[in-house]
Image (cartoon, rainbow, N blue to C red):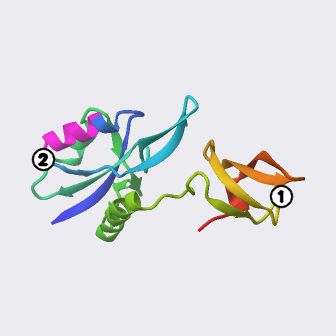
Amino acid sequence: MKSWYLLYCKRGEQQRAKMHLENQSIECYYPEVEIEKMVRGKRKRVSEALFPSYIFIGLDTSIGPSFTTIRSTRGVMDFVRFGGQPHQVSESLITQLKECELGEQDCSQLPQPGQSIQIKSGQFSGFEAIYQEPDGEKRSILLITMINQQVTIKVDNTDVEWK
């Protein structure tokens, strides 16, 4: 019967480990998410690991390769262990992760440029603003009207509310 385990991989070698594990007919799950990131001042969609340096593997211990063979695979450091034994991950967790990964591509976390938003806390609390663009991962650039002039401000994403 197949069980899921979690492997710790060498830094930056998850793809190599996944390839070599799949060559041994081991089912691998390496969850990735697509995010918007600022790269050299431009917004870019990139794919990043949900759990950097970790890979889930589905393994039938009665017919599959041994734990030692898996640990010796290029890119793999070791199993995640509790009490000296490789820890089994529940099938429901893998199913939930796969469902979340599929559903996440439809929703965007940030508002669209030009969208009207409300500042709910911070020094500009109560102001209505126009969303311009993200400023890194945790802040946004907004336009607010002060003394009949539009002023550009930078605000933490936790301080604004959009729908």
Residue 155's place in the image compared with 163, above or below, is above
Question: In which quadrant is the C terminus drawn?
Answer: bottom right
Along the viewing direction, whichever of 60 and 161 lies nearer the viewer: 161
Mark 2 vs mark 1: which is more N-terminal? 2
Along the viewing direction, whichever of 154 and 136 lies nearer the viewer: 154
Residue 18 belongs to the span the image colors magenta: yes
As drawn, which residue projects farthest toward the front?
148
Q: Quadrant of residue 98?
A: bottom left
Along the viewing direction, whichever of 88 and 124 lies nearer the viewer: 124
Residue 132 belongs to the span the image colors magenta: no
As drawn, which residue projects farthest toward the top?
40
The residue that appears at 86% across and 53% down in the rendered structure is 148
Q: Amino acid at mark 1?
A: Phe
Secondary structure mostly taken by the magenta-highlighted segment of the chain: helix
Residue 78 lies, in percent from the top left, at: 35, 43
The residue that appears at 77% across and 46% down in the rendered structure is 153
Q: Quadrant of residue 107?
A: bottom left
Pointer 1: residues within 10 angstroms few (<14), some, or many (20+)? some
Identify the residue position indicated by label 1 in the image: 124
Question: In which quadrant is the N terminus drawn?
Answer: bottom left
Residue 77's place in the image compared with 129, above or below, is above
Residue 128 lies, in percent from the top left, at: 75, 62
The residue that appears at 38% across and 64% down in the rendered structure is 100
Along the viewing direction, whichever of 42 and 29 lies nearer the viewer: 42
User: Which residues are the magenta region?
Assistant: 16-25
Q: Which disc is residue 25 wearing?
A: 2
159 relative position to 163: left or right = right
Q: Amino acid at mark 2?
A: Ser
Number of numbered labels in the structure image: 2
Residue 125 lies, in percent from the top left, at: 82, 63
As drawn, which residue projects farthest toward the left?
63
